[in-house]
Amino acid sequence: MKFGGTSVGDTDRIKAIAVHVAAAVATGDQIAVVVSAMAGQTDDLVGLTRTASVAPDAREQDAVVASGEQVSAALLALALQDAGVTARSWLGWQLPIRTDGQHGRARIEHIDTGEIEAGLKRGEVAVVAGFQGVGPGCRVTTLGRGGSDLTAVALAAALKADRCDIHTDVSGVFTADPRIVARARRLDKVAFEEMMEVASSGAKVLQLRSVEIALNYGVRLRVLSSFGDDSGTLIVAEDEVVEKRVVSAIASSRDEARITLLGLADGVAAAARVFGPLAAANINVDMIVQNLAADGQAANVTFTVPRSELASALTILEAAKPEINYRSLVHDSAIAKVSAIGVGMRSHAGVAQQMFAALTDKGIGIEAISTSEIKISVLIPEEHTELAVLTLHTAYGLDVED
Amino acid sequence: MKFGGTSVGDTDRIKAIAVHVAAAVATGDQIAVVVSAMAGQTDDLVGLTRTASVAPDAREQDAVVASGEQVSAALLALALQDAGVTARSWLGWQLPIRTDGQHGRARIEHIDTGEIEAGLKRGEVAVVAGFQGVGPGCRVTTLGRGGSDLTAVALAAALKADRCDIHTDVSGVFTADPRIVARARRLDKVAFEEMMEVASSGAKVLQLRSVEIALNYGVRLRVLSSFGDDSGTLIVAEDEVVEKRVVSAIASSRDEARITLLGLADGVAAAARVFGPLAAANINVDMIVQNLAADGQAANVTFTVPRSELASALTILEAAKPEINYRSLVHDSAIAKVSAIGVGMRSHAGVAQQMFAALTDKGIGIEAISTSEIKISVLIPEEHTELAVLTLHTAYGLDVED
């Protein structure tokens, strides 16, 4: 069971988790719990390091930040003891959870579960500090954004757990964001591949890397609300998804910005010149559309970058203008990416066409398109996000219960 | 160098320490720094554990509380890096600082200084989290009150350091509390034995155990203010103290309460019956005075306990009334202990008499007396504390410079 920052936001919530875990223990389950830092704590700690240093050493920053999960894990162990459950906290270095030395975004290399398993057999609940590990030279490392989910999935894999329950603010994976679509329904099951596309399409349910690891190690993953009694959404192998709709979910994201380079010389070879410098700066480029211009020589290329990295991207592209050799550059932050996702697409034709027709019908302009085997994404003006999601939810028959 | 909680109270102060350490490094010194948690942090963390559990498991409480020094040590390492000094933080388990398993008041068993020494030789400053270690089963332990001083002294001993500088709120050891005696002077040197008596007589300069360890391991200890440029007070072997006054310092403490048991039957054998139950409850008894009553059989016994433990002591004594066999019990919290301390007493007679005469002259009643080779303590009504300290400071010739 993994509980995020909001679920451990104060000691009252921690006690509520303890009651929840105690009830599961009472059914005979053996349970390891992974916790995030108390809500807001990680940001506060990062802020402290930034007041102590203009460019904090990632190793020392990790030592500061990891203290957040150290506190929440020990507090939950205490609350469990008060709830009558034998429990102890485990820090990254205590198990240990070995990682590489990429501080701030370390990768888990190995989890030693010997001590935890011995404890589980004695009926002891292991409360593991999420987000942290120990790297080369005995230094504390952290795993980066979504790190506690990673800890949970990796620990479940190492323990060969029957299931990994990710307790979060939402009660599962929905056919669309319920804040946009009142008729959105929680899915009982989604395929790993769908979940990965959902994760990379703007839904804040689970980090992509956690889903990947779960898929690779065959971890049966469940997403559910922190205290709700419903069963959440189970993430399963594709052949376990009984309800095979063509489209399972509509996702939307406003985290991206569009950049268009106009009048690129030597159009066909331009891509390498454009994306080389961005890749070197570690800027993630999504949705790329390239058209040869009217003269057949100069080309236009449109792509998206995370909105938070737009400024850096523009600086890089302007500095590299002579090498890239383009006429002009335009950009737009007021855009949204809307995606239709479903493993059923593999066996159905015309799914994309249905999307374009539905959006065009509503007068929504499509600025770019990208597709994978089980996903179609379009870039549209941000103001049309809700309309597009609602339209597609209806168009793909997701409004109605089966 | 050890810096306490107030000195690392916020990042501005941490930066000021970094500047101070950097200046020392620039002179060619090899430096290890020990830090406490940021002021107030330890109390806040203890408070959290108490809201999570009615009787917090000391092991989990230690894991929570130790995070305070983890943060301050890493922040100081960051600030040092910004000040141009190579530095890294070391947590108790990283060195490691091995302790026994008495959580909350663990004793240091061994400090492995291999990595720190290698770093020092490379010109690196080691910033060590005070107050914490690692005990049996890889669990985080804390050393109890004054624990960071202990870490500093033990580390200085392990490193065979030339000196251990304890930076604190006061600028050294004074002939009396300067808030009481305007003419109190800072002592350039005090003997270890004097420092131990000062520490056990109410001065909040250093914990007794730290001084003991420094004495046992020959650590040259210095107490000085956090940022002051004066040289503080050096704590040295008795034969190094040049200025051999009869009395070096007057100390006072309001931390105690007096208990008197009246009409103890079988007076001569009563002490064991009285103090056995208190010792079993780990209540520290100081200053014991026993008088046989007029009939030569029943006795009265007066003693002091820490004020914070008065209630427990009374409960224990009342419960054990039948076994102890006394007529009645009186107690008083409005008392103070005033002590005169000095290695010169060893070779001077009449020092105690001088004290009693001076106090009696001012009409101050003496409720109990205890003496050691280099200390005389009296118990007086609390309201006379300042008067007694001022009177003795004058009586022993401490008002005037040599």
Image (tube, coloured by chain):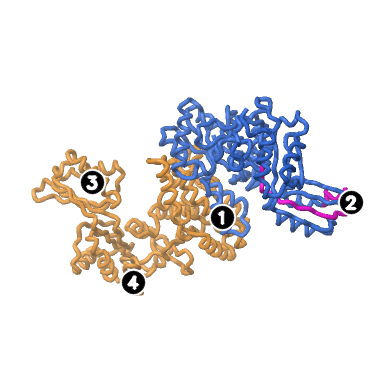
Chain colours: A orange, B blue
* Disc 4 and disc 2 on one polypeptide chain: no
Chain hosting mark 4: A
Mark 1 highlights which residue? B47
Give the labeled residue for mark 4: A182
Number of on-image labels: 4
At label 1, the amino acid type is Gly
Q: Looking at the rendered structure, which numbered label has been put on residue A314? A: 3
Disc 1 to disc 3, how far (Cα)?
49 Å
- State which quadrant residue B361 falls in: top right
Q: Residue B294's mark? A: 2
Q: Give B27 or A270, whichever is nearer the viewer.
A: B27
Residue A118 falls within the magenta-colored stretch: no
Q: Check if mark 4's residue and mark 2's residue have beta carbons within 8 Å.
A: no
Which chain's residue wears label 1? B
Tell me: A208 left or right of B50.
left
Q: Nearer the viewer, mark 4 or mark 3?
A: 3
User: Which residue corresponds to the image point at 24% horizontal and 59% vertical from the top-left?
Assistant: A378
In this rendered view, identify the residue nearer to me: B16 or B98. B16
Question: Which chain does the numbered disc 2 sit on?
Answer: B
Residues under numbered marks 4 and 1 in contact, where contact means CB atoms less than 8 Å apart: no
Please state which of the two labelled residues, at mark 2 or mark 1, is closer to the viewer: 2
Type of residue at label 4?
Ala
Q: Picture coordinates of residue B97 (x, y %)? A: 59, 38
Separation of disc 3 and disc 2 at Cα?
A: 98 Å
How far is the residue under mark 4 from the one under mark 1?
43 Å
Instruction: Provide the residue span drawn in magenta.
Output: B251-273
Q: Which amino acid does label 3 sit on?
A: Leu
Decide: few, some or many residues near mark 1? Use Cα within 10 Å; few <14, some 14-19, many ≥20: few
Q: How far apart are marks 2 and 1 (CA)?
A: 51 Å
